[in-house]
């Protein structure tokens, strides 16, 4: 039996082993089912089998060894789509490479059961050679990935820090122009837009610096004190409402809201969630911020009505650099999203020992729900 025929006739067995291994690579692998990555693996194997059944020239063989072929021709293959989705659910280069190594090992191991003793010896030697190449590749990819991530994150940290200085000058100039009598009433609208843009850029830079901090191994520091969560809600509400006076943001505080939190960090969480709601919410529907005291915890909800978030996106929305595509939101000038706000909010909430969840439906809107214990502890996420 040829290997190509064996693959086609044993797809289910091969994929079963591949799935079991994929789920051991990363906690985000649990989203594999929802994103249909297994279907891509089936298509990848079938494409490999078709390729092996066709004759191959020396040039074609050379091109494949260099990673050319369909990619060079601009074709979107199942393997290319698979790679994009692995990135979406949080896999890194090492995990992607490990997945393909496991796929190859599964195919060869299962195929060996159908070979004669003589053929099996030859396949064993070939398998050992492949394993040696895989080990060398794994070591190289790991070091390359680490160095690439370190240099990228250092660059982002420096960029975010250096952008703050000129932005501060713009903010101070806009505030001075906003003083009564400095400019004509007809020009105040322009000044207001400048101030809104400065706030948006400040939020982006803040998120960028927080993200690079986590990626450089320093984590987001959280120093909890006994504090009224309602005050943090009011602070975030007033900040976002002032920046977007055309949006109606309702605030409701219920019960005893005292808990051990880091006030500045928790206000940052609420600010990120409210700005997200402003960006994606409908203009004619109000946004709601609710905080309610429970016996052992404080629960909060930020609700907006807009485009329903697809179920598959709900599973990865807290991953860094993930954005929900929304034509309406994309066209708004006040967008503050670079795909980091929800990731950072989730990081801070978890540092408080709490949880941040999201649901989205036509009837109930998009609801981000926070639950934090009244008693927290100092913690830094590395």
Image (spheres, rainbow, N blue to C red):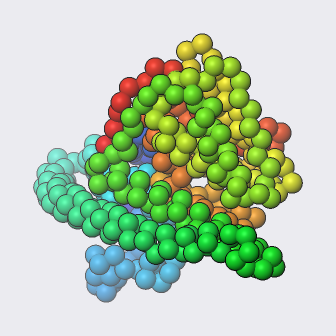
Question: Can you say whether 189 is above or below 304 in the image?
Answer: below
Q: Quadrant of the N terminus?
A: bottom left
Residue at image x 52%, y 24%? 259
**Relative to residue 255, is residue 128 depicted above or below?**
below
Q: Is residue 148 left or right of residue 83?
A: left
Q: Residue at x 62, y 45 (%)?
A: 236
Judged from this view, the residue extending furthest toward the top is 295
Q: Which one is nearer the viewer's eye here, 246 or 175?
A: 175
Q: Is residue 72 above or below residue 135?
A: below
Extreme residue toward the right, this view: 284
Residue at 83% in and 39% down: 363
Location of residue 155 by image quarter: bottom left
Quarter placement of the C terminus: top left
Location of residue 151 in the rendering, given as x and y in whole percent from the top left corner: 27, 67
Q: Is residue 47 visible from the viewing direction of this image?
A: no
Q: From where the camera sits, is residue 54 visible? A: yes
Residue shown at 63% from the left, 31% from the top: 230
Q: Nearer the viewer, residue 233 or 286?
A: 233
Question: Is residue 329 placed above or below 293 in the rendered structure?
Answer: below
- Taking depth in this image into account, of 252 and 103 the one nearest to the observer is 252
Residue 262: % across, % down: 46, 35
Q: Is residue 258 left or right of residue 193?
A: left
- Residue 38: x and y in percent read 50, 49
């Amino acid at each position: 039996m040829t290997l190509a025929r064996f693959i086609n006739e044993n797809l289910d067995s091969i994929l079963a082993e591949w799935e079991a291994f994929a789920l051991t690579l990363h906690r985000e692998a649990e989203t594999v089912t929802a994103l249909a990555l297994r279907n891509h693996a089936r298509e990848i194997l079938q494409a490999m089998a078709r390729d092996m059944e066709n004759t191959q020239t020396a040039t074609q063989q050379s091109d494949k060894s260099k990673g050319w072929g369909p990619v060079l021709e601009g074709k979107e293959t199942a393997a290319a789509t698979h790679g994009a989705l692995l990135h979406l659910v949080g896999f890194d280069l090492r995990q992607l490479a490990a997945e393909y190594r496991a796929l190859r090992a599964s195919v060869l191991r299962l195929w060996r059961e159908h070979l004669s003793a003589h053929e099996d010896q030859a396949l064993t030697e070939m398998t050992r050679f492949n394993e040696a190449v895989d080990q060398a590749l794994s070591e190289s990819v790991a070091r390359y990935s680490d160095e690439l991530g370190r240099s990228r994150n250092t660059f982002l940290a420096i960029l975010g820090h250096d952008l703050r200085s000129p932005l501060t000058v713009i903010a101070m100039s806009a505030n001075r122009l906003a003083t009564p009598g400095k400019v004509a009433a007809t020009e105040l609208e322009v000044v207001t837009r400048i101030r809104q843009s400065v706030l948006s850029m400040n939020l982006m830079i803040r998120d960028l610096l927080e993200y690079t901090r986590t990626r450089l191994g320093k984590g987001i520091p959280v120093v909890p004190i006994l504090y009224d969560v309602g005050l943090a809600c009011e602070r975030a509400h007033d900040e976002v409402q002032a920046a977007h006076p055309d949006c109606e943001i309702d605030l409701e505080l219920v019960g005893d809201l005292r808990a051990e939190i880091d006030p500045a960090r928790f206000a940052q969480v609420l600010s990120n969630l409210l700005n997200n709601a402003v960006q994606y919410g409908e203009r004619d529907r109000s946004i709601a911020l609710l905080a309610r005291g429970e016996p052992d915890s404080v629960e909060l909800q930020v609700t907006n009505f807009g485009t329903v978030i697809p179920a598959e996106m709900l599973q990865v929305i807290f991953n860094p650099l993930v954005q929900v595509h929304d034509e309406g939101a994309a066209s708004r000038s006040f967008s503050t999203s670079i795909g980091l706000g929800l990731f950072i909010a989730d990081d801070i909430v978890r540092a408080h020992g709490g949880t941040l969840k999201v649901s989205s439906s036509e009837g109930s809107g998009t609801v981000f729900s926070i639950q934090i214990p009244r008693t927290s502890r100092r913690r830094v996420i590395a």
